Image (spheres, rainbow, N blue to C red):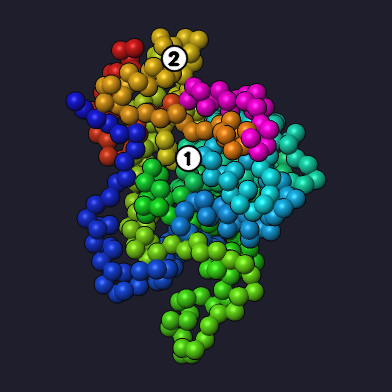
């Protein structure tokens, strides 16, 4: 039976050969490859500074710590996102405040955002979910002087009115998990145009050290050890991962172009299914299509979403819910007293969203097979 995965990384001989250099050189931890990857990534996104990290979760944590977020602060996050968005806030000792979403885009709802701002709000984290920009013009206008951290985990290469992910907020965090359009296995990146914030995050990423490992290794004073004036973290990417990232970043634009081509194909061929709402892309946005997430209208569908997903899997087509309604997860229900109805659109997205396969290893016959099985319902 044919099997079509929900996502697959696109890796090959170039990536395999790229890891030889750090292995042969012996520089396996953060070093010249990381620095080169940061330079390439920032250039691709028109951003002054980039810092590679172990994951997008640690990129979010590093940015929040660099912004001075701590106990007594509130950080507004969308209720429909991967749990890491909220977890990073808790790591800093701050309180995540959940904002509902717009069901048309699955992104933060500006109208609900207005009601969540208090005098304790330190940062707003709009998520560019599944590769689609949040409504940044509206969010920035509402935010005023409040800091904005873009959770661009899914949005490397995405754009909004001519600006790339990371250009609009005070900082942005990206993911290179294998389900993303480009990958380093695990790994992340935090970007900013704020030089002072960059310097702070650079120190915090490396245990709070005032002198980097690179400087110590190549400097003329072998006895020099760093001073530690800050409580930092080990959030560093390895040169092995960065070597893969340097190959992947050169392919990113082509990957996104291909994903947009097949997303348009899906939308055209599935348009006759009145119970399946395919992704909406507002004018001025380039969607990165980390995932092709639909909404199942169970008032019209032949069976509930979960049964549709089971039917597709029985036919070799792997699907997933879009993501979580974080405010409904056990830790946040128990510790913050959240109820499903507190963010009703996020609740509904949790129950009725469905990602169908879209990635750079799929061929036309794969897309046609998915379409055939959906049309047969």
Spatial distance from mark 1 to mark 2, Cα to Cα?
26 Å
Residue found 19% across the figure and 25% down from its top: 1
Residue that numbered label 2 is attached to? 304
Residue found 50% across the figure and 10% down from its top: 299
> Quadrant where the C terminus lies?
top left
Q: Nearer the viewer, residue 341 or 218?
A: 341
Q: Nearer the viewer, mark 1 or mark 2?
A: 2
Residue found 28% across the figure and 69% down from its top: 23
Q: Nearer the viewer, residue 44 or 227?
A: 227
* Residue 111 on image: x %, y %: 70, 31
Image quadrant where residue 99 sits = top right
Q: Nearer the viewer, residue 57 or 243?
A: 57
Dominant secondary structure (helix, strand or loop) of the stretch shown in magenta: helix
Residue that numbered label 1 is attached to? 131
* Residue 2 on image: x %, y %: 21, 27
Q: Residues within 10 Å of mark 2 (few under 14, many from 20)?
A: some
Q: Is residue 311 above or below residue 122?
A: above
Q: Which residues are magenta?
A: 334-353
Nearer-N-terminus badge (1/2): 1
Residue found 36% across the figure and 26% down from its top: 266
Q: Nearer the viewer, residue 178 or 130?
A: 178
Q: Is residue 162 visible?
A: no
Q: Is residue 158 above or below residue 25?
A: above
């Amino acid at each position: 039976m044919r099997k079509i995965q929900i996502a697959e990384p696109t890796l090959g001989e170039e990536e395999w050969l790229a890891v030889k250099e750090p292995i042969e050189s012996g520089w396996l931890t953060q070093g010249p490859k990381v620095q080169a990857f940061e330079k390439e990534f920032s250039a691709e996104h028109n951003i002054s500074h980039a810092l590679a990290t172990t994951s997008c979760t640690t990129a979010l944590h590093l940015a929040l710590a660099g912004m001075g977020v701590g106990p007594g602060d509130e950080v507004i996050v969308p209720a429909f996102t991967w749990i890491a968005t909220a977890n990073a806030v808790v790591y800093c000792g701050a309180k995540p405040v959940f904002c509902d979403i717009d069901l048309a885009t699955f992104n933060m709802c500006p109208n609900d955002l207005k009601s969540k701002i208090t005098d304790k709000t330190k940062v707003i984290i709009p998520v560019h979910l599944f590769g689609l920009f949040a409504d940044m013009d509206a969010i920035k206008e509402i935010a005023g002087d409040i800091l904005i951290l873009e959770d661009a985990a899914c949005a490397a290469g995405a754009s909004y009115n001519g600006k790339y992910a990371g250009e609009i907020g005070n900082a942005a965090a990206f993911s290179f998990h294998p389900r993303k359009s480009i990958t380093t296995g695990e790994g992340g990146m935090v970007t900013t145009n704020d030089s002072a914030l960059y310097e702070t995050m650079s120190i915090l990423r490396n245990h709070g050290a005032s002198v980097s490992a690179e400087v110590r290794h190549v400097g003329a004073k072998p006895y020099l050890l760093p001073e530690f004036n800050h409580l930092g973290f080990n959030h560093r990417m390895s040169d092995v991962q960065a070597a893969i990232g340097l190959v992947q970043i050169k392919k990113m634009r082509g990957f996104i172009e291909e994903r947009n081509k097949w997303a348009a194909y899906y939308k055209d061929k599935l348009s006759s299914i009145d119970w399946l709402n395919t992704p909406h892309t507002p004018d001025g946005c380039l969607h990165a299509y980390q995932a092709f997430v639909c909404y199942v209208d169970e008032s019209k569908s032949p069976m509930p979403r979960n049964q549709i997903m089971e039917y597709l899997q029985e036919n070799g087509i792997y699907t997933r819910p879009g993501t979580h309604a974080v405010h409904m997860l056990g830790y946040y229900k128990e510790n913050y007293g959240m109820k499903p109805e507190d963010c009703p659109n996020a609740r509904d997205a949790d129950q009725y969203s469905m990602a169908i396969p879209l990635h750079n290893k799929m061929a036309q016959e794969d897309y046609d097979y998915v379409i055939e099985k959906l049309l047969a319902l």
